[in-house]
Amino acid sequence: MKHTLILLALASTLALSACQRETPPVVQVVPGPAGTPGPAGATGATGAGALPGATGATGATGQMGDSGAPGYDGAKGATGAQGNTGAQGNDGAKGEVGDEGAKGKTGDTVIVVPKR
């Protein structure tokens, strides 16, 4: 009995699905007389600006300028610093020996007495 129920359910499903087929409605377009033209549309927006162009080539080198006038004389320099003290000189030559002096006179004898 189980097999019969399964087969019966399968057959009924197939039958019902065959009955429910719908064909899409067919729309047939019939051309009519041309209508009057509509009003002109609004002006379109301005287009985007163009990209900038490439950089131009470098120009030729200019002529050399005239020589400048000679400069003025510089200011006088400052006085230099005083030099260091010189080294000591050598000793002089030894003088000659003098003559012998004359003999003196014999003098008086002096006695000194202390005070009391």
Image: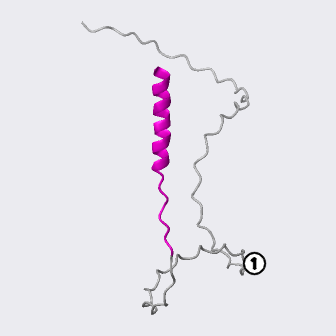
Q: Is residue 8 above or below residue 108?
A: below
Disc 1: which residue: 60
Give, as a single range, the part of the protein colored magenta. 1-28
Residue 8: within the magenta? yes
State whether residue 56 is above or below residue 33: above
Residue situated in front as seen by the camera: 43 or 55: 43
Q: How many marks?
A: 1
Residue 82 shown in magenta: no
Provide residue 84's location: percent of width, then percent of height.
61, 41
- Nearer the observer, 50 or 110: 50
Identity of the residue drawn at 47% across and 45% down: 17
**Which SS class for mark 1?**
loop
Which residue does the image show at 64% across and 75% down from the upper left? 53
Q: Which residue is at 46% across, 38% downward?
A: 12
Q: Position of residue 63 (x, y in %)?
A: 75, 80
> What is the three-letter code of the residue carrying label 1?
Ala
